[in-house]
Image (spheres, helix red, strand yellow):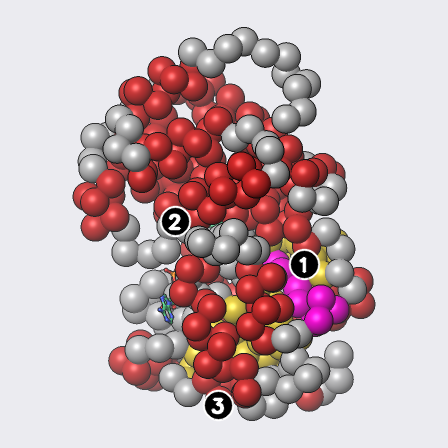
Amino acid sequence: MDRMSRRVAVYGAGSWGTAFALVLADAGCDVTLWGRRPELVDALNSTHSNPDYLPQVKLPGTVWATTDPAEAAHGAHLAVLAVSAQKVRPLLEEWRPQWTPDTVFVSLMKGIELGTGMLMSQVIAETTGAAAERIAVLSGPNLAAEIVDRMPAASVVACAEERTAAAVQEACHTHYFRPYTNTDVVGCELGGAIKNVVALAVGVTTGMGLGDNAKAALITRGLAEATRLGVAMGASPLTLAGLAGMGDLVATCSSTLSRNHTFGRHLGRGLTVEEARAATTQTAEGVASCQAVLGLAERHGVEMPITSAVVDMIHGGRAPHEAVRELMSRAPRSESVRR
Ligand SMILES: NC(=O)C1=CN([C@@H]2O[C@H](COP(=O)(O)OP(=O)(O)OC[C@H]3O[C@@H](n4cnc5c(N)ncnc54)[C@H](O)[C@@H]3O)[C@@H](O)[C@H]2O)C=CC1
Ligand SMILES: O=C(CO)COP(=O)(O)O
């Protein structure tokens, strides 16, 4: 990357946008972090911390926050998107004129758009007009609260154009953050979105006190669901077996830091969906995206019983113990059945 391209815009000053701004700054980039709330942006600039999401972070002086999206875009060759997946479309439409024909977009978002069933890379392509060579996604086991403590983590940067993936990899490679490249964008995005749904299911069984065998079964069969849908949509099963699939399943389904896992635990302990929502101040993407994932599964003729159970619990009023009973009483089958 040339000198100019060391300027990066990160949109979304929530947990992951803030943590990734730190990674980029540690990798030598000058980062402008866009946030929508002036009081949070002021706090970021005056304290170099993020009191609302990650008070423990100490951002270096090369991270500057702004509420002005045009200021964020100015001179930045990378536009990193870290807002909630269901909220990004109108923002991209509004901001489109601020980017240049060279801007490379990097999605950090792990969700599928409700209504359209589009992956975030597809939403970016449709709203900005950018070609696939300029759209990358970053996905992997990357809990923001660990990253800001500079604890070791690996991730995947995927782009149809290997050189773009390599440029993004170079922009965010630090001594504690190790990104791999991949050209399988669909596999990486599906892995990131579906692990959130599986983490909700694991959270439910954890909240119900159903033990580690249940957790292992959900993680493994959740991976089977992700792989079936991925293959039907053109992804490589190896991608789902990698960091963006299995890796992120392990992190998210094991960690109490995960918002999806925590939301599921609330349900498993007997909270209603509304009570769980009220207890969750940050984005738990699986809550909305589970419906979009199930829609994709139906469109592609793929069975996803865990996803279906999560949709039933969150959007259909099904009690957790009923969902567990239904999953366990499904007709016996071979482990190798593909669809
Ligand atoms: N937190 C984490 O550890 C990780 C999160 N992710 C993904 O990153 C994405 C962002 O998640 P987080 O930063 O964790 O969520 P968050 O809840 O901490 O922050 C969400 C951000 O989106 C913004 N936002 C929400 N609605 C908006 C709207 N209508 N207009 C403008 N901005 C709006 C919020 O102001 C906030 O800056 C999600 O897709 C998540 O799955 C991916 C990897 C790790
Ligand atoms: O994606 C994540 C870790 O890789 C964060 O998971 P949650 O969104 O469930 O907190």
The tag on residue 71 is: 3
Callout 3 secondary element: helix
Whole-percent x, y for residue 229 in the image = 62, 37
Mark 3 or 2: the one toward you: 2
Residue depicted at x 59% and y 69%: 126
The tag on residue 157 is: 1
52 or 337: which is nearer to us? 337
Residue that carries the numbered disc 2 in the rendered image = 288
What residue range appears in magenta?
Answer: 131-138
Callout 2 secondary element: helix
First reached walking from the N terminus: tag 2 or tag 1: 1
58 or 1: which is nearer to us? 1
Tell whether label 1 touches label 2 (CB within 8 Å).
no
Residue depicted at x 66% and y 51%: 186
- Report if the beta carbon of the residue with label 3 is closer than 8 angstroms to ligand 1: no
Q: Does residue 32 show up?
A: no
First reached walking from the N terminus: tag 3 or tag 1: 3
Residue depicted at x 28% and y 50%: 280
